[in-house]
Image: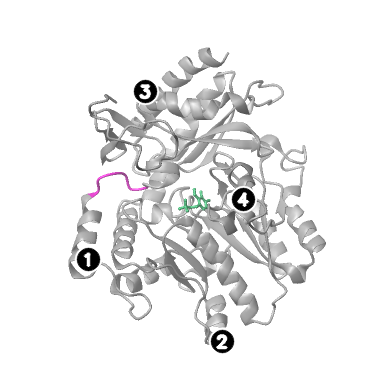
Amino acid sequence: MTDEKAMDQKTAVHRTWRKMPVAERGEGIYLYDADGKRYLDGSAGSSVVVNIGHGVQRVNDAMYAQMRKVSFAAPHVFSNAPLLALGKMVAEHAPGTMKNNSRAWFTCTGTDAVDDALRVTRQYFVSTGQRSKTLYISRWQGFHGNNIAVTGMHGHTGRRRMYMGLNINSPHIPPAYCYRCPFEMTYPACNLKCARALETEIRQQGEENVAAFVAEPVVGAALGAVPAPEGYFQVIREICDKYNVLFIADEVMTGWGRTGHWFGIEAWGVTPDIIATAKGMTSGYTTLAATIAREEIWAAIEKTGVPFLAGHTMDLNPVSCTGALEVIRYVEEYDLPKNARESGAYLLRRLEELKASDIIGDVRGKGLMCGFEFVKDKETKAPFPAAEKISARFQEAAMENGLVLFSGTGCVEGVAGDMMLVTPPLVITPAQVDELIDLLKKTLTAFEKQVR
Ligand SMILES: Cc1ncc(COP(=O)(O)O)c(C=O)c1O
């Protein structure tokens, strides 16, 4: 970026302290900065958001038409038509036995959706006289959001450590992470020990104290696109049922077609009790998130007459609900879950080629939620020292080459390990996958020389 064109970046705090290119416009899978440089958006906006691609005018038009009617309808006294239509549409797309048997609460960000999943769980157990159920079990190397309450619950060390002491530190079980199995076992001989660890934790904590188990079907930011193995969530579901523990699926990244299903959990054929979702629901055209819970959960709360005790000023927003409706219609019309399966399978095949590099240890993913992991030593799987900031540097090098990726760290005990997410918009074509891989390989070839 030339200095003349650079705007003053001192008055708004950014995600890094470095100067960033200024995004000017987007079209399909591409973004353009203020200097006219083109980037292939291999992260779908930022960590799995822009599922339908950039610049889809009909979404903006729909929101503008709503704005001309009413932009904000005081949610303490009004409902609004887009909200009602979206509630119906979400229930129609809900997985398994939640389909047309659930209600959704709409708020602003993925963190809110997760926080509200914890709230609806709590209010359900209070409403049904089970007050002692206060614990939420989650997994190490799982991420669920960034407010201070949720940082106590999730298991992404780098994003929670700072806040310990300010939040309630939830119990955690090991992740389902076959490349670095926490039990040093191999699937399927392991008999899914990582899933059975939930039963051990519930028994140790006391089932009367455990409210819910929270997990991402495919772990995003904290592991770099690691799907749980076949059978994992079936075992989780059985354990939750056995101990009267709710299962909250965090579908903030995996929802709305990303993994080749409308919701990621469908790949395991089980139905959660509550789903938190956001990102792809509006594809980043506006901000909106949803907490979807089974009908009987809401009905139990409703029966008490106490309203759901969540709420932010911007919840239930008619313009945002309109944006989500138009995005979901687009996903339906172009059958983007199908493209996520097809282009995703092709992307994963091509990413496998990266394993020829002696600094790439693993490649994984589901649908168009893919990732890879760096290692310093392929034999021992030893990670690079954290101080070398390998994934952040790779992200920067890719940007230089016109490729947007999302870097992560902490797959090794939360404090080491470098991963990259490769999650392009769901509209990507096989030819564009080739272009992405060319940019990736170009970046990797130069990068290997730097780090060896
Ligand atoms: C699985 C998961 N849950 C929750 C969140 C929090 O969402 P948001 O950043 O919209 O608050 C994220 C964000 O990346 C996420 O990946």
**Residue 100 in picture, x, y percent from top left:** 45, 72
Could you give the CA–CA distance between mark 4 and mark 3, rounded to whole angstroms? 36 Å
Could you give the CA–CA distance between mark 2 and mark 4, rounded to whole angstroms? 35 Å
Residue where numbered disc 2 is placed: 304
Answer few, some or many: residues within 10 Å of disc 4's Cα (few below 14, many 20 plus, some between 14 and 19).
some
First in sequence, mark 3 or 2: give its number.
Answer: 2
Residue where numbered disc 4 is placed: 163
55 inside magenta stretch: yes
Disc 1 residue type (three-letter) = Gln
Q: Which mark is residue 401?
A: 3
Could you give the CA–CA distance between mark 1 and mark 3, rounded to whole angstroms? 39 Å
Q: Which mark is residue 126?
A: none
Could you give the CA–CA distance between mark 1 and mark 4, rounded to whole angstroms? 40 Å
Where disc 3 sits, the SS reads loop
> Which residue is depicted at the point 54% across and 44% down?
220
Disc 2 residue type (three-letter) = Thr
